[in-house]
Image (spheres, rainbow, N blue to C red):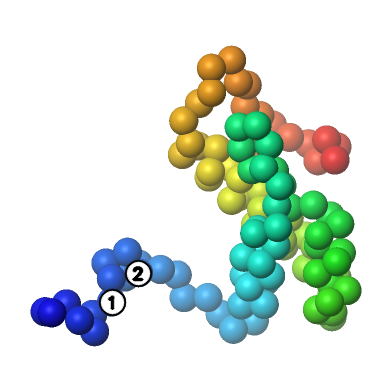
Amino acid sequence: MEDEGREPKALENRPDIPDYLKEYFKAFYFLSGKRSVGFSSENPISTQDIVAYLELYPTENRELFTFLISEMDTEYLDTRSKTRPSVKGETKQSSETMTGNEF
């Protein structure tokens, strides 16, 4: 096979994640798999799941961890909502219009 040992094209432009951020990306991927799914889309990662994760894997700065995971989740869900087909009659509220008081 001619392409054997070559990196797939899809991985050529992947970001280089600094070591100090890898903990957050690993946690996000783990927690993302725990999210519930509603009728038409994925739901945000629950605070309970973040707290449970921190009980299992303590970190120095819980507040920063929670903030970063929540921000990553918001970006993830915004990106997913822009790429999935609209459901008839559905109204979308983007994170730009959310104030944070919804939670």
Which element type, helix, strand or loop, lies under badge 1? loop
**Quarter of the image containing the C terminus?**
top right
What x and y, as percent, mark residue 57?
80, 79
Please, what secondary structure does the residue beneath circle 2 have?
A: helix
Report which residue position mark 2 lands on.
11
- Going 70% across and 58% down the picture, which residue do you hit? 34
> Residue visible at 67% across and 77% down?
23
The amino acid on which the numbered mark 2 sits, given as a three-letter code, is: Leu
Front one among 36 and 12: 36
Above or below, comparing residue 71 to residue 89 in the picture: below
Q: Quadrant of the N terminus?
A: bottom left
The three-letter amino acid code for the residue at tag 1 is: Glu
Look at the image and tell me whether residue 21 can be seen: no
Identify the residue at horizontal 28%, vertical 77% (top origin).
7
Tell me the crowding category of disc 1: few under 14, some 14 to 19, or many 20 or more residues within 10 angstroms, Cα based. Answer: few
| Residue 90 percent coordinates (x, y) | 60, 20
Q: How crowded is mark 2: few (under 14 residues within 10 Å), some or many (20 or more)?
A: few
Position of 101 relative to 57 (above/below): above
The answer to whether mark 2 and mark 1 are in CB contact below 8 A is yes
Residue marked by disc 1: 7
Outermost left residue = 2
Residue 73 in the image: x percent, y percent? 66, 53
